[in-house]
Image (spheres, rainbow, N blue to C red):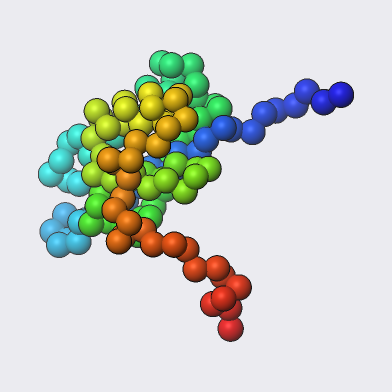
Amino acid sequence: MTTPGMPQPAYYIFKCQQSAPPGMPKPSCVRQDDPESQQLFQYLAQQLMMKGIIGTVQPVQTGCLGRCQQGPVMLVEPGHTMYVNLNKEKIDRIIEEHILGGKVVEEYVIPEEFWGEPVAPAEMVR
Ligand code: FES
């Protein structure tokens, strides 16, 4: 018999919330000159809440995920799926098709040349 307990989340969604200081040439996921980019985390959390799936889907604000040129980005785990160039519409589709439907929205995933196969830490360790 299984013991009832606190279920683990089905998904974590790590949303990059890094904001470059004004005047910085480097792009960042949250931009001073782009109000929509500033609203995306809140939008994501609200949509999950309205659908009643927050908790089993855990949105997490993170710092830089290292793919700033493609920002705004978010990483969905499990699956290691990096979504790029996000806006509200794309977030809606990702929730419907990936989170609820179980099917990755391939057209919003980072191009392969920016997301090559990972290197096993054991191969790199000194
Ligand atoms: S600022 Fe978001 S990935 Fe670097």
Looking at the image, is 114 positioned above or below residue 56?
below
* Residue 97 visible, this orientation: yes
Residue at (70% x, 28% y) in the render: 6
Residue 2, by quadrant, is top right
- Extreme residue toward the bottom, this view: 126
In the foreground, 115 or 58: 115
Quarter of the image with the C terminus in it: bottom right
Image point (30%, 61%), residue name: 113
The vertical placement of 103 against 111, above or below, is: above
> Can you tell which quarter of the image residue 106 is in?
top left
Residue 110 x, y percent position in the rendering: 31, 50
x%, y% of residue 77? 50, 43
Camera-nearest residue between 10 and 31? 10
Q: Residue furthest right?
A: 1
| Whole-percent x, y for residue 46 in the image | 37, 23
Question: Quadrant location of the N terminus?
Answer: top right
Identify the residue at image location x=45%, y=24%: 100
**Total numbered circles:** 0
Regarding residue 17, the answer to whether it shows in the image is no
Horizontally, residue 9 falls left or right of residue 89, namely: right
Q: What residue do we see at 38% from left, 24% from top?
A: 96
Q: Residue 123 at what x, y percent from top left? A: 57, 76
Location of residue 2 with respect to 17 vertically, above or below: above
Which of the 4 image quarters holds residue 95? top left
